[in-house]
Image: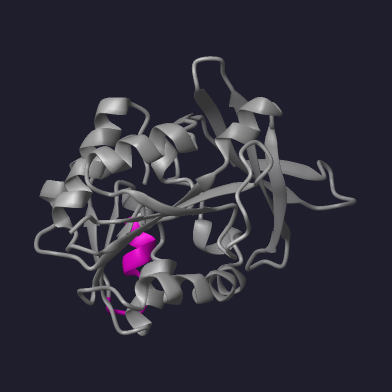
Amino acid sequence: MAPPDDPYARLSYRRLIDWPERIQREAPFLREVLGAAPVRRLLDLGCGTGEHARFLHAEGFEVVGVDLSDEMLAQARDGEPGPTFVKADLADVGGAVEGTFGGAICLGNALPQVTEPARLESFFRGLAARLAAGAPFLLQLLDYARIFERNVRALPPSFRTDDAGETVVFLRLMEPRPDGTVLFNPTTLRWRPGAEPPVEVTAARNVPLRGWRDPELSSLLASVGLPVEARFGGMRREPYEAGASTDLVLLARRAG
């Protein structure tokens, strides 16, 4: 999910992330959580380029992907047919989609782009209103407890080969701030060892984020009827340890 000025307009996440490897790694957990969904309709919130939505569609679900980035949605729609993609802010999801859903996912760096507490509450309330009783909600984001406590300034770089056979380096730099916000700088470099210059910046943006942490998320989810029943440190069900885990994964469920 991207803000209205679309900071991801020049970043092709479809090419910068090894999606086949990621989907293979996350598939067992997704099947476990969503397999018994009370309704075979799912929401992919902050769907980006739609890889999770297409995977879940192939699993037999009707999937609606929601994102605010025109560029991301254009890439999502330029793929195999199946999922429906809707442009909307996550805070407005309750009015942006129709009907009842049997589950929802919000994975990656989508949630921290909802930076205001009131809009986060609007997101969770709108989502709860669209979920059937017993429907799971799987939320995954970075463990911002670790990022703030350890002053983490970057995630590991990703190396990919573009269509021209050149190496593209994807950097995710960040500046944690005392007020709980994070200035995120997704950056792509073209790396040509031996050339002059050997490194060229091809895209770099400033993206303001809010570093939401477990206590505030769990409290707000419970208040809207989505109590958290389990938390993990990653999509392989690793144990969660605040301040030490790489990710925070919350499994909430719509109260009956």
Residue 208: x and y, percent?
Answer: 46, 28
Q: Residue at x 30, y 84 (%)?
A: 60
Q: Residue at x 26, y 31 (%)?
A: 119
Is residue 141 shown left or right of residue 120?
right
Bounds of the magenta span? 73-82
Is residue 173 shown left or right of residue 166?
left
Residue 83: x and y, percent?
Answer: 27, 72
Front-lying residue, 32 or 190: 32
The vertical placement of 216 against 68, above or below, is above
Q: Is residue 29 visible?
A: yes
Q: Magenta span has 167?
A: no
Q: Is residue 6 visible?
A: no
Q: Magenta span has 81?
A: yes
Residue 124: x and y, percent?
Answer: 25, 43
Q: Residue at x 31, y 27 (%)?
A: 117
The vertical placement of 97 against 145, above or below, is below
Front-lying residue, 83 or 195: 83
